[in-house]
Image (tube, rainbow, N blue to C red):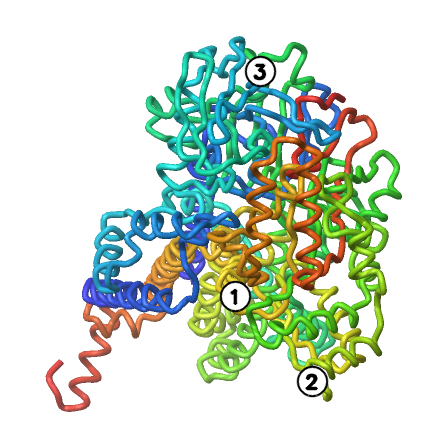
Amino acid sequence: MLRYIIKRLIYMVVTLLATVVFLFTLMEFVPGDPALVVLGEGATDENIVAIHKELKLDDPYIVRLSRYVGNLVQGDMGNSYKTRQPIAPALFARLPLTMTIAVWGIIFGTIIGLVAGVVSAVKQYSLFDRVLTAISLFGASAPSFWLAMLFVLIFTLKLGWLPATGSYTFKHWILPIATIGLQASASITRMTRSSMLEVIRQDYVRTARAKGQTQFRVVVSHGLRNAFIPILTVIGTNINGYLGGTVLVESVFAIPGLGNYVLDGVKTMDTPVVLNGVVFICFMCTIVTFLVDMAYAFIDPRIKSTYGFGTKKFKRARLAKAIEGGTAG
Amino acid sequence: MKRFVSLSLALAMLLSLITFGLAGCGGAAGTAGSTQATEAQKSGFSFNTGDPDTLSVIQNFDPEVFQPGNNDEQGYNRIARQIYETLFMMTPEGEVTPWLATGYTWETPTRMVITLRDDVKFSDGSGFTAEDVAWTINYAKEITLPVAHYNVITDAEIVDTYTVALNLKEPCMTMAAHLCNSQCTIGYKKAFEEGKGDWLGASVVGTGPYKLVKYTPGDMVKLTANEYYWRQGEPKVKNIDMRIIKSNESAATEAKTLNYDIVIGANTREFDAIDAIDGVHMDKHQSANTVYLLLNTAKAPMDNVKVREAFARAVNIPATVKLAYGNFGQPASALISPNILGRNEATYQKYYGAGHDVETAKKLLTEAGFPNGVDLEITVESTDTQRCDMAEALQAQVAAAGIKLKVNKMESAPMREYLARGNHQICIYGFTSLTMEADGFLAQLQPGSSALARIGYDNKNFFKRYSEGAATEDITARGKVWEECCEMLMQDYTMIPLWHKALGAAVRDNVKGFYWASDYEQVYYQFISK
């Protein structure tokens, strides 16, 4: 297992480094003079020259890349062109809000998605299955900003039950999390249903039923557990997507999350904000991917055993397989 | 089974702990204060509209930092101006009045001597002196802050404790009006030095009616009254809670919920719907900003004056404005907005009075060598829905005259750069007469300014007359020069005025004293009561 973790960690570092170099290089191709971003409407030729000197914009690409990577490794993300303030504190201040929407949205979506997907699979072609399939199709195809605005219209302006914007109390979080959750649940429902349909037709499920196990135990222990790997992949992909992609929901509910921060950077051509924001989101995504990889190993003993730190039972099974194949384990 | 269930539960709990842990430790910057959640819980989700001591406001700009002159956006300065103040201020009637200053004299045409009030204190109780004024201006120039008003200043010099002199590169008789602008607020040298330039905390000390209590990035600014404020009886409301909502749709929604006293930044299309709600009204005011079609005279085929004139004839301004803004604001009736020195409706009538005339447009295009029509491109900011609507309306109108107009929608900052490089043929852009005189926008069309490339104008006489106007002390004579400069711009069809902008805010009926300052679209909360 340790070998597995180390291998994944090495992948993570290499991916991150490659991403940083790629993004920095990409930003080089963004047209525009940062001096004009700093100086705004009243830029004069004289001031543009001064800003170029101050920001060392005329240094060669490789010098600036080395300086950026060197500073980043030390935790220094540099300053925003627009505000001239450090970027790191601004990013970290926004992280909790995005995390709250993304993680709670996913938890909410996963609960709904798993239950709906399992029931749909078990009751295949029933009215319940058809209704759930239609709802999940709607959830997957409705844009998040539209869902968000629909919720505001119904629950704020018509019924007056919930606040329209903000992130201060439990009530404020309901609509953003419901928006994300409903979207996430659609893909999880669909994946759970198709994955479960494959698994519940397997011999071992039939055997479990024949042994007289309860329906709940058959479905959850033998069915869902074996169907969970692709579902986990979808959950991981969703978390990654929502870490950087809740911007529309953040915008409608006026939640100052990471997505909004990076979007503002894009609008004002504040390239250090965009670069560091995207690098930071990539960093978060690699961590999530790493955690999902770890979860695979816990859920699927075959992965764990591949790396030599499996349970005794699987070690024995692997040894038996090796002997059977005529090779030494 | 057990392991699977316990693993799922553990994962869910871990994620919850991470998010709540993060929510607990992050999210707030600025000075001390109780947590945001606690305050919000106290007031539910309505932001203290019932509390006479607190004004709840929605702003559409996140300041990110509280440094005098750090940003040239009106929205930024609408917040910073509550903490810092200017030497002069524009009255609602558009007249320059001393504020932190008591007056000024011109020692020479390039040396302005300003005397300061001796009873002004910063919010920490220390006295305000000439040292702070000189430091603010010199520091802004040293680190190249985006304050265009300081471009003409060489340096600021302390004469004595309450007198400061500004040395200028060239005469600028409207300097006092420039110094009214909220970009020219005065900081506190000692707080800057002791706070080591912490513009989110220790260095944020001004002479303004309010002081910063807490700033939550992207979300909220909390201000409270400066107990050392030099104007007796102000501010009238002790606290301001400013929510930052950038989406104009969301701001409009909040205006309809009546959860806030003042909402700035609501979508103009929702103004009538908001006005129809009991308990709130739209406070509308004429701005000093006019939106133009800027024709780049340096870019072919717009370098041909006949093509520019043909375009001016092909557009239907009243119909375009009606479509985009309804009855809000007014279609242009001169090159600059009403109440601005240098405005002349007669010269506007002379050049643009004939209005929409497709046949004349076709004839002019033929004379220009385009008998079969011409392909042109109009650049417009993609996030400004009204301007995008206008561009599409114009596209349909000019087609009748044989002009195939392509609409190029760009984000704000890339667009600024695109225009600064003179890559466009036509664009929709606004200019504000910041000094309530035409020079407020004419100054931006002078050599050395990046804004000049928007019209690519190269008329030596225009530049010469502008310099002469800037050096003219007599206001009436100066007004005549500004009229002359405006006429040159119209005569050469460099810009077609479209819409004299109006400002609007949703204000609850119990809020008194709200007004917009036309010059820079500012709001002075110190005069507002509930």
Q: Quadrant of residue B25?
A: top left
| Marks 3 and 1 in Cβ contact (< 8 Å) | no
Which of discs 2 and 3 lies nearer the camera? The answer is 2
Looking at the picture, does residue B405 appear above or below residue B36? below
Q: Are marks 3 and 1 on the same chain?
A: yes
Question: Dot 1, crowdedness within 10 Å: few (<14), some or many (≥20)?
Answer: many
> Does label 2 or label 3 sit earlier along the sequence?
3
Between residue B289 and residue A157, name the one nearer to us. Answer: B289
Q: Which residue is mark 1?
A: B422
- Which element type, helix, strand or loop, lies under badge 2? loop
Which sits in the foreground, A292 or B409?
A: B409
Question: Is residue A301 shown to the viewer in this render?
Answer: yes
Residue B398: x and y in percent read: 76, 75
| Image coordinates for residue A119, horizontal then vertical, percent | 62, 70
Q: Report the amino acid beneath label 1.
A: Gly
What residue does disc 3 label? B102
- In the image, farthest residue toward the left: A328
Specify whether disc 2 shares its chain with disc 3.
yes
Residue at position x 65%, y 35% in the image: B522
Which of the chains bears the disc numbered 1? B
Judging from the image, mark 2 belongs to the subunit labelled B
Q: How many marks?
A: 3
Q: Nearer the viewer, residue A187 or B463?
A: B463
* The N terminus of chain B, quarter of image: bottom left
Is disc 1 placed on a helix, strand or loop?
loop
As shown in the figure, which amino acid type bears the numbered disc 2?
Answer: Phe
Residue for badge 2: B370
Distance from Cα at disc 3 to Cα at disc 1? 43 Å
Asked if residue A103 can be seen in this view, the reply is no
